[in-house]
Image: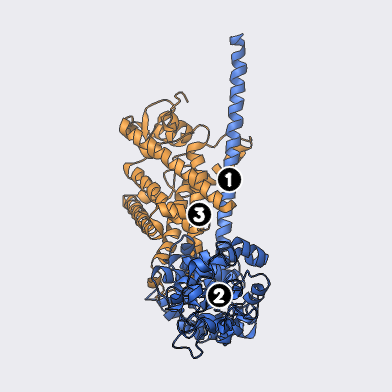
Chain colours: A blue, B orange
Amino acid sequence: MTLGSQCRAGAVLISLIGSAVGSAETQAAPVVNCDNCHGNREFVTGVRAPGDTSLFVPSPTLAETAHERLACSDCHRGFDAGFPHQAASKVSPCQACHESEGREWQASIHAPTSAATGDAPNCVGCHGSHLVYRISDRRSPTYSLNVAALCGRCHADPRIIGTYFTAVDKAQARTAVAQYYETVHGHALTGAGLTVSATCNDCHRSHRVLPADSAESSVNRNNIPATCGRCHVGIVEIYAQSAHGAALATGRRNATGHAAPVCVDCHSAHGIVRADEPRWFLGVVDECGTCHERLYETYFETYHGKVNRLGSTLAATCSDCHTPHDMRPATDPASSVFPASRVKTCGGCHPAANANFVRYEPHGDPQDRARYPTLYWTWLFMTILLGGVMAFFGIHTVLWLGRLTLDRAREKRAARSAGRPGQA
Amino acid sequence: MTRRALNSADRGQGPYLWRFTPLQRTLHALVIASFFGLVLTGLPLHFAQAGWARVLVGLTGGVEGAGIIHRLCALITFGYFTTHLVSLARKLRRGGGWKRVLWGPESMVPQPRDFRDLVQMFRWFLGRGPRPRFDRFSYMEKFDYLAVFWGVAIIGASGLLLWFPEFFARFLPGWVFNVATIVHGDEALLALSFIFTVHFFNVHLRPGKFPIDLVIFTGRATAGYMREEHPLEYERRLAAGELDQLVAPPVSRTAYLWSTVLGFASLGLGIIIIGLVLWAVLH
């Protein structure tokens, strides 16, 4: 598919002119002037197949690319040895120069598929063949603003997803690229032109792309805090000291069998939104609730939770009391909900909060008689009162209706029988 | 019943007699208006998980707007409650008035005869005796009145706690706000459940009263109505020669129209609200 890899020598008659002329910068000056033949469109068109122009590579092609100082023969080794080109001549692998990148790619999930079917990219698949612009060059497909589109060429392709992704991954894979554009990262990049914002390769790596279930993967659960931390400096240190970070480090699971959440569990992977947006504020409760089930339910029994349910950001949500990243058990003196810290924490919204005020139970559970006896008895009294009054007057109403209906039916019957002789 | 009128207080023979004073009618209208305001803005919070909650709170100005309406209606509630207490105090002070207010046929205080009436009512339901004959206030009307009295006190007090938590936390522990939340919501749920079913049935929807009784709006009902619904009061006043002082002119067309519209609107809205509650509870 590229000139270099496909070019077969010896098929064309050619005149070799100016063999001494070559790139001034390269030490090994080419013996032949490639441009004499490959710079002539008519001449090289159709050599490999009718209408195929792939052998047409006029000489300024490499100008402004990362390889502008290279000669053709630096990659097309041996092609400068004379004409016809030697059959044994091959394109020098990119690894010859780009050693570490090549090694990383060899270890990626792209490498075996690339070799087997060509459906996954090798170097040229992403960087191009001749037009290998620097990644800082806007023309490069690997320029940060272009990466999502580049990856999307395969990762938004139903054929690729259908063939290479497991059933579990398919749903996420299908929407990942499209979703990315809607995230805070995607908006920053495409909307605000912030080239420092994360794009595919910032999380998934450029060359060593590995599926999340691989322990080596940058997006493996255990590695995610480090991956996000490459940009979000400071947050990861806080997270590491939190209950979540500690549980991740030890592999401990909570009472409901859930592993410790990492960044993407709350922020999602491809649906990340700004944490000051209402939809984040309203949605984060559901994220916390996937593990903290009872606290989730009891939160919605309180004013805070009910207001949140109604779609308002007026009242506190999980992270307002428990902090976004430094959540710790209430028994930890460093916790925002440690009894001595509550006046300050509640004071964030209730400036006049005092020691009395913070004895409010933000997760008070009337069903939990052992822990909240007062709430339990209050709830029981109110329920019996409500049920009792409604049951008593329900019976009262039904009986009354029954009595009136019976009496009316009897009156009608009496009127009919009284009226019959008159009618007859 | 001789006349088939829409308003059951128009049915029956005889002249119109005054039953409620302008102050009583005004206060009841304020009860209706503020109660609907409170229910419509409080119910979405109580049943925040119901599908209609967000719609209803959206119609009432969002959580902030609904909160403002709720507090304004609370002020109206405190206003009519205070007005009633003042009028009650005046009646008590008037020479020997406290006897009439606290006991006897004109009093709202439950008395032995109310319990006898209740038993008699059940006997009548089951076909084991005649229908009890009521004086000025039946035990149901007394229950309605005292339920509002209790309800305003309980819901009002718990509501104030939740309105000014930082102030009350100066001398009360924070868990009272948990208690207040349960009490406020459940007592309010009881109030609306009772009013929009039992009260509506007793006063408006039962056969003989259906579809509406406007006496609380117009203040007057026919002598025939009084003989049927409050025979003891009628006979008592007849014997005392007080009936002549109670004769009222028929209600004006405008007042009748307004009463009808407000009455039916309230009935309809109340029944819709019961539907919303059932929807939320059954889902």
Locate the N terminus of chain A by quadrant: bottom right
- Label whose residue precedes the other's in the sequence (1 or 2): 2
Amino acid identity at mark 1? Gly
Q: Are marks 3 and 1 on the same chain?
A: no
Of tags 1 and 2, which is closer to the observer?
2
Q: Is residue A358 left or right of residue A295?
A: left
Q: How far is disc 3 from disc 1 in space, using C-alphas?
A: 15 Å
Residue at which label 1 appears: A394
Residue wearing tag 3: B189
- Direction from residue A245 to residue A279 in the image, left or right: left
Say which element carries label 2.
helix
Question: Residue B212 appears at what percent x and percent y?
Answer: 45, 35
Q: What crowding class fits label 3: few (fewer than 14 Cα within 10 Å), some (14-19), or many (20 or more)?
A: some
The kind of residue on which mark 3 rests is Leu
Name the one closer to the observer, B75 or A133: A133
Instruction: Tell me which residue sits at (60%, 78%) in the image.
Output: A85
Marks 3 and 2 sit apart, C-alpha to C-alpha, by 69 Å
Question: For the view shown, which residue lies furthest in the top direction?
Answer: A424
Residue A124, numbered circle: 2
Q: Residue at x 50, y 87 (%)?
A: A29
